[in-house]
Image (cartoon, grey):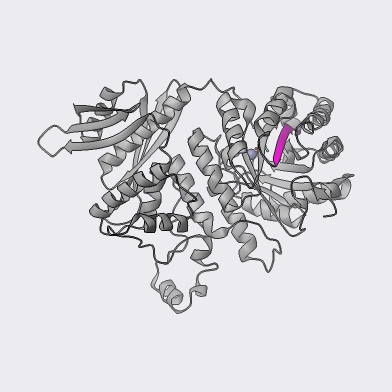
Amino acid sequence: MTFSHPSFGALDPDRIIIFDTTLRDGEQSPGFSMNLAEKLRMAEALAELGVDVLEAGFPIASPGDFESVESIARTIKGPVICGLARTGGRDDIARAGEAIRPAERRRIHNFISTSPLHMKYKLRMEPETVLQAVIDGNTQARNYTDDVEWSAEDGSRTDPDFLCRCVEAAIKAGATTINIPDTVGYALPEDIARIFTMLRERVPGAEKVIFSAHNHNDLGLAVANTIAAIRAGVRQVECTINGIGERAGNAALEEIVMAIRTRHDALAWHSGIETPKILRTSKLLSTITGFDVQPNKAIVGRNAFAHESGIHQDGVLKNAATYEIMTPESVGWTKSSLVMGKHSGRAAFRDKLRALGYGEIGDNQLNDAFRRFKDLADRKKVVYDDDLIALVDDEVMRGNDRIRFVSLDVHTGSKAKPRAELELEIDGTAQAAVATGDGPVDATFNAIRDLFAHDAVLRLYSVGAVTEGTDAQARVTVRLEENGKMVDGQGADTDTIVASARAYVHALNKLLVKRTRAEPKALSA
Ligand code: KIV
Ligand code: ZN
């Protein structure tokens, strides 16, 4: 690389820039929306993980999106903070520019479709008008920052000559990163390699920019396509934690990073990701969104390092390398997950949280989490790392909630009608209610409705276990819908009904945040 990048200066040619879009492409997929506090918590974790660019959102999409990008730009140190904008809309770029302004290093990412199909049916624009928009958009974006990325949406299905003309125009207008997305996850690795090789060979000025890949996983090829792109000269990869994103998702950050690390013999590049923080970041995302990864998910799935067959177990005991191509510790799985007991003190608790990858937690949140830990340690024989993570994430995420869970007593059995005695704190005032129902969960949810009347409809109720055994904490997800808005709430506790109450209250708090925001405009990206 022979030039100085506006955000990264003189670039190490072997360094892969990790562009994380968990909070934009990931967050905009159904069921994965997050509130401001959750986005900030996630952004903090991504910064600690070591991502180079953090795409924080799409500021024009809604006042809420603008606010979260602006808050992340103001508070998160480390990565370049990026806001998305449509190339065609002058307001988009101005809003993105305003939202990212507080960041030390900032990027505008503007995009427009370039494939015949998208230009004709989605944009209803002629190719020459799209080309002019590319020039205008990138020129405008440079008024807000020197770090400008341009994306050719549906780039992998774009006519090669037209793609070359657009990329040349974007570079001339000031773009410093050129991203070619496989928007619909259609390409094969050889298609991706051909596109980037062609652009680097044919486009004047190609040597002055970073090329970037953004692959969707509709055919399960997103990571393979990303590796093919790196081999073809791409130095930025766009990805998400757990591979979340539109439809089948984006390329998974953890899989790309561990592929280049584990197969360094064949892939001689490196990233700045602190790989032992991968698991913790993945779990935080699952806690926030309520979606666990599948057990066999590479790197972060529960079974990723589990050996069931006797032959495999025997091999691993003799030498772990027989069946493990990377160490579990290298991605954050700890050998001994047994942690602390009821005699552990606050200092040990704080140390343990640091070791689990939590930065500084405020005193109030630490006190609340510590109280819940003591309570858990009293009830549960062994407290595992996963228990602590579930508990602390639960507590940290509830900082600004209007409704807080205080206590619950449930009387149930095969004869009597289940009855729930519930206490909540609503806007700082403790309130209690007693309700019955068709089961203990129903009685509890009725008590919540008595204390805080609302019209939201329950769309999903699911229960999973944080760890193993009958004394494991239950992790409950509750999905509520109100006026077409859907939110997911999570709660964890050794008592499934208490976890259910916490999850319901969490979902209600999220709805309250949504109510105070304006309707988002329908946009696609
Ligand atoms: O998939 C896509 O094309 C995108 C662009 C906005 C980069 O997400
Ligand atoms: Zn995308």
Q: Quadrant of residue 124?
A: top right
Residue 80 occupies quadrant:
top right
Q: Quadrant of the N terminus?
A: bottom right
> In terms of secondary structure, what is the magenta stretch mainly?
strand
Left or right, 448 with respect to 436, comes to right
Q: Which residues are magenta?
A: 105-114
Q: Quadrant of residue 468?
A: bottom left
Quadrant where the C terminus is found in the figure: top right
Estimate the x, y position of residue 349 in percent, counting from the top left. 38, 56
Residue 346 is inside the magenta segment: no
**198 and 287: which one is in front?**
287
Q: Percent position (x, y) of residue 266?
A: 69, 66
Q: Residue at x 62, y 52 (%)?
A: 223
Query: As drawn, which residue projects farthest toward the right?
Result: 204
Asked whether residue 381 appears in the rendered view, the answer is: yes
Q: Nearer the viewer, residue 385 or 312?
A: 385
Position of residue 313 relative to residue 433, above or below, is below
The residue positioned 56% from the left and 51% from the top of the image is: 48
Total numbered circles: 0
